[in-house]
Amino acid sequence: MATDLLQIHPSDITFRFELKKQSSCVVRLANHASHYVAFKVKTTSPKKYCVRPTVGIVQPHGTCDFTVTMQAQRTVPPDFNCKDKFLVQSAVVPAGTTEDDISSDLFVKDSGRLVEEKKLRVVLITPSSSPENGDLSQDPLIPMPSPLTVEKSLEVAQGLKEDGTDRGTVVPRVVEKEGDMKQVNGIEKLSFPKDFKELESRLGIMDAKLREVSHKYFLTWISS
């Protein structure tokens, strides 16, 4: 917000409001002229806010910051609407003026010197979202087979175990021994093993794994 003497940024005093916690806002005053400017900060609620510094000198083409701290509050304002105001007074002063020379008389408008005032309102906002308060990330869900698919798989495995025949059914790869598997149209298919007991052992492992998957899916389906 531009004035003849100082530019004030931001134009509002903004606080992230949390119950029983202090909040601060930094305001910058910029002097783009070739003269020295004194400033003084006032508020309508001096017991509620702490301003540091309340007075100062901004050198030509220089800047100066002041910090406003809102004391911890025990109640939330209705509709998050705060009616408190701040007033920034500024006046041209001669070179060599110090903070000790700044008094209320310096900002009297009928004193003959150039004096300006700018009102700043107080704005309250909610705390920004954070990992602690935000949504927790969730792992992607692993698709589960349908009950019908699991049931059919169990039937196929049981039939293979009882008959000891292939029946042309495609099954998952369960061994890595050379010769036990062969490629058929890009799909690994179990060939008739030399040792029937070895096949029976593999089918037993398959049967146990399929039943475990079916049991887990059933529990997931029941709890959903």
Image: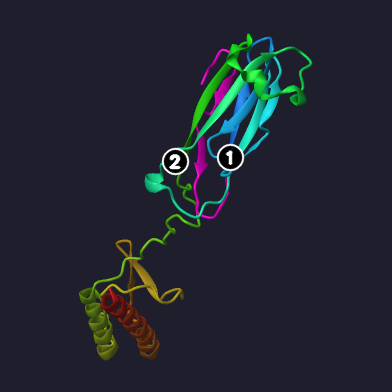
Q: Nearer the viewer, mark 2 or mark 1?
A: 1
SS state under label 2: loop
**Magenta extent:** 1-23
> Which residue corresponds to the image point at 66% horizontal and 32% vertical from the top-left?
54
Decide whether residue 17 is among the magenta residues: yes
**Residue 65: in magenta span:** no
Could you tell me which secondary element the residue under label 1 belongs to?
loop
Q: Quadrant of the C terminus?
A: bottom left
As drawn, the label of residue 46 is 1
In the image, residue 217 sits, relative to residue 143, either above or below, namely below
The amino acid sitting under disc 2 is Cys
Q: Is residue 17 visible?
A: yes
The disc at residue 82 is: 2
In which image quadrant can residue 104 be found? top right
Decide: few, some or many residues near mark 1? Use Cα within 10 Å; few <14, some 14-19, many ≥20: few
In front here: 124 or 193?
A: 124
At 68% from the left and 33% from the top, the residue drawn is 53
- Residues 187 and 4: in front is 4
**Residue 105 percent coordinates (x, y):** 66, 20
The answer to which quarter of the image holds residue 197 is bottom left
Q: Tell me, yes or no, whether the two marked residues, 2 and 1, touch with CB atoms within 8 Å.
A: no
Q: Position of residue 19 (x, y in %)?
A: 50, 54
N-terminal label among 2 and 1: 1
Q: Nearer the viewer, residue 114 or 68?
A: 114
What is the magenta segment's predominant secondary structure? loop
Residue 100 in the image, given as x and y percentages of width and height: 77, 26
Q: Can you tell which quarter of the image residue 174 is in?
A: bottom left
Q: Looking at the image, which residue is at 30% across and 70% down?
A: 144
